[in-house]
Image (spheres, grey):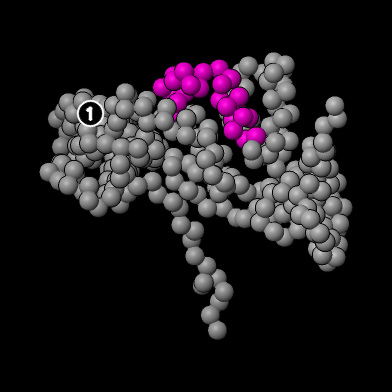
Amino acid sequence: MSNSSEHTTTPRVSVVVLNTSSDWHEWIYVIKLKATVSDIWEHINPDTPKDDIPALSEPERPTPSEVRQAATRIADLSAAEREEYQDLIRQYRRDLDLYDRRKRGIATIQNHIIESLNRKHLIYTFDCDTTHDILVSLKNRFKPTNEARERELTLQYQRLKTLTTRNMNMEDWLLQWEKTCRECRQLNLPDVAGIRPVRDFVYAIHNVDSEFALGWRHQLAREQVDPNMEIRDIVQEFRNWKREAPRDDREYHGAFEATFQGHPISGKRRDCVCGEDHRFKECPYLVDSKRPPNWKPDSAIQQQIEEKLKNPRLKETINRIRREDLPTAF
């Protein structure tokens, strides 16, 4: 019988693939990160002119003549000179080891570049003699101009603020907020100046979690929010809010539906406590005004709801919905 350890596999790490101009910044970031760890970025940086790229040359082994000009063999050296020669040899070995590591690092980076490039774009690597040449060619093809980048990010941000339907994975949406705002900040776009992203996020999240949004809207209105608060801070506040919510509350509100950048993104259904696919405020078991004439509750469903309403936070949410449905007295 085979050992269970034989069946273990190494987790696959996602690779950023360079396919369009919108991939460039993330893709080159990964390349730079890998190259910096291997101490070779200065040898391949596509922003450095080719003539200014430092040469990667194999060091030459020292000879006894470097210690004494007339010496041709180690035996020609005195004891003190031999020690000096050994110091040169040790330095040579360190330099050779560094050269070998950098050479291997450049080869590894070049393989990664090819493997993370969409096949149809391999043509941009043809006739390139060095890794630096390859990166320059890809930069010329894919790096967007600042103007194009500004337009793209501005459009992304505006779409991000609008939930046009109700079907999206929440964590994906939160990550998009963090990513898009960070990239907008790098270009100093006015859309994300100051506390604007925090305000925009709070208003955008209202249809997803009104309880969270209302609390923060009150703080914003009273100017009780730190003006230096970053988007990542408010997003993390929301993550903590959902994480600390009772299990039933997370079950019913843990996913929402939306579209991002015009593309529908699937998420799980948001079932009511009665088991139907509608919002709490539309449920006849919870809201009197939603009950049609001669409506009668199912006793089994009613009992199921009563069990779920033992959750204090869920019960408070339902009570708030019921209070909002009460007729206004004049």
Q: Residue at x 57, y 74 (%)?
A: 4
Q: Position of residue 124 (x, y in %)?
A: 18, 43
Residue at screen point 74% across, 29% down: 215
Q: Is residue 97 above or below residue 47?
A: below
In the image, residue 271 sits, relative to residue 178, either above or below, namely below
Per the rendered image, the range of residues in magenta is: 183-206
Total residue callouts = 1
Residue nearest the viewer, comparing 264 with 25: 264
Of 241 and 131, which appears nearest the observer? 241
- The kind of residue on which mark 1 rests is Ile
Q: Is residue 124 visible?
A: yes
* Left or right: 324, with 253 as reference point: right
The image quarter containing residue 64 is: top left
Q: Name the side, left or right, on which 169 lies relative to 315.
A: left
Q: Position of residue 119 (x, y in %)?
A: 25, 52
Q: Residue at x 60, y 55 (%)?
A: 268
Across and down, in percent, residue 112 comes to 32, 48
Residue 132, visible in the rendered structure = no
Q: Which residue is mark 1?
A: 53
- In the rendered image, residue 295 lying in the magenta stretch gets the answer no
Q: Residue furthest front?
A: 293
Position of residue 93 measured from the top left corner of the image (x, y, whole percent):
31, 40
Relative placement, left or right, of 296 versus 41 is right
Is the C terminus in the top left, top right, bottom left or bottom right quadrant?
top right
Give the residue drawn at x 45%, y 26%: 184
**Residue placed most toward the observer, 307 or 196:** 307
Identify the main secondary structure in magenta: helix
Q: Residue furthest bottom?
A: 1
